[in-house]
Image (tube, coloured by chain):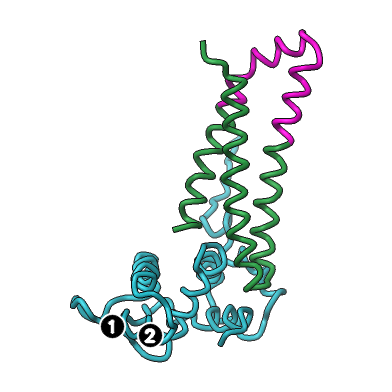
Chain colours: A cyan, B green
């Protein structure tokens, strides 16, 4: 008897949407991209370049990359309004780019682990802004 | 009965206004950060704006051309309105994310 067996191809998510789907972006800039997650790169670009006041957010991030600071210190260093800084810091916290060190009122903020791992993206964006 | 054609045109004009605000924000960013990313954002938003303007012009021309076309345009106007209102909702969310 003729037995007809069908081998269904099994697709994993990585087959349909490959992990390196944004690999084409490497052709634009290729210095130290190999250790950077391309999906995180896309998120950081859209938060900084795709929103109003995103450049101030980039400045805050690169300031916090050096040392943890509280909102007041950020405001005086960048010569920004205190309320503006609070707003930016809240947005960055919601997007899990920075985190409060303690739960106090005047606590300082530091970068999260995923942001620390992908700091090269931030450096690259800051080079484009030209206000390092 | 609600005139879906006028509603659709109003929705398209709202889309154009929303996109104009979005493009303004993107251009302000592009002047500070020159890269393929900011350029792409401006390009996409501008093309969407052109699409909305063209839709209004196209349907207005169709509407005024002759009465047969006017009837068929009236028959499908609710679908056009549905398309435009969905786009309005989507663009409102985009604008809210961009301007917050």
Which chain is disc 1 placed on? A
- Compared to residue B17, the image places residue B68 above or below, namely above
Q: Nearer the viewer, residue A95 or A12?
A: A95
Q: Nearer the viewer, residue B99 or A115?
A: B99
- What secondary structure characterizes most of the magenta part? helix
- The image's mark for residue A108 is 1
B94 sits to left or right of B19: left
B89 sits to left or right of A1: left
- Label 1 – label 2 distance at C-alpha: 14 Å
- Residue B86 drawn at (x, y percent): 53, 35
Earlier-in-chain disc, 1 versus 2: 2
- Disc 1 crowd rating (10 Å Cα; few below 14, some 14-19, many 20+) is many
B77 sits to left or right of B66: left
- Residue A106 drawn at (x, y percent): 23, 80
- Compared to residue A98, the image places residue B79 above or below, namely above
Judging by the rendered image, the residue that carries numbered circle 2 is A76
Residue located 60% across and 67% down the image: B29
Answer whether residue A122 is magenta in the image.
no
- Residue B87 drawn at (x, y percent): 56, 38
- The image's mark for residue B39 is none
Identify the element where label 1 is drawn: loop
- Disc 2 crowd rating (10 Å Cα; few below 14, some 14-19, many 20+) is few
What span is colored magenta in the figure?
B54-81
Residue B74 sits in which quadrant? top right
Identify the element where label 2 is drawn: helix
Residue located 37% across and 83% down the image: A74
Which chain is disc 2 placed on? A
Position of the C terminus of chain A by quadrant = bottom right
- Compared to residue A93, the image places residue A101 above or below, namely below
């Amino acid at each position: 008897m003729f037995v007809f067996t069908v081998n269904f191809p099994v697709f994993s998510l990585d087959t349909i949407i490959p992990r390196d789907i944004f690999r084409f972006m490497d052709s634009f800039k290729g210095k130290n991209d190999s250790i950077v997650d391309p999906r995180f790169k896309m998120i950081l670009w859209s938060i900084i370049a795709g929103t109003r006041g995103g450049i101030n957010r980039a400045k805050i991030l690169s300031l916090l990359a050096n040392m943890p600071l509280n909102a007041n210190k950020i405001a005086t260093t960048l010569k920004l309004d205190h309320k503006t800084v609070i707003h930016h810091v809240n947005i960055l916290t919601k997007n899990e780019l920075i985190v409060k060190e303690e739960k106090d009122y005047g606590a300082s903020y530091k970068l999260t682990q995923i942001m620390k791992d992908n700091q090269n993206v931030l450096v690259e964006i800051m080079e484009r802004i030209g206000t390092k | 009965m609600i005139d879906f054609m006028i509603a659709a045109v109003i929705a398209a004009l709202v889309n154009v206004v929303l996109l104009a605000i979005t493009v303004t924000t993107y251009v302000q960013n592009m002047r500070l950060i020159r890269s393929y990313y900011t350029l792409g954002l401006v390009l996409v938003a501008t093309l969407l704006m052109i699409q909305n303007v063209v839709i209004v012009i196209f349907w207005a021309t169709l509407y005024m051309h002759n009465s047969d076309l006017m009837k068929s345009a009236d028959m499908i106007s609710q679908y056009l309105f549905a398309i435009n209102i969905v786009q309005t909702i989507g663009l409102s969310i985009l604008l809210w994310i961009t301007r917050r």
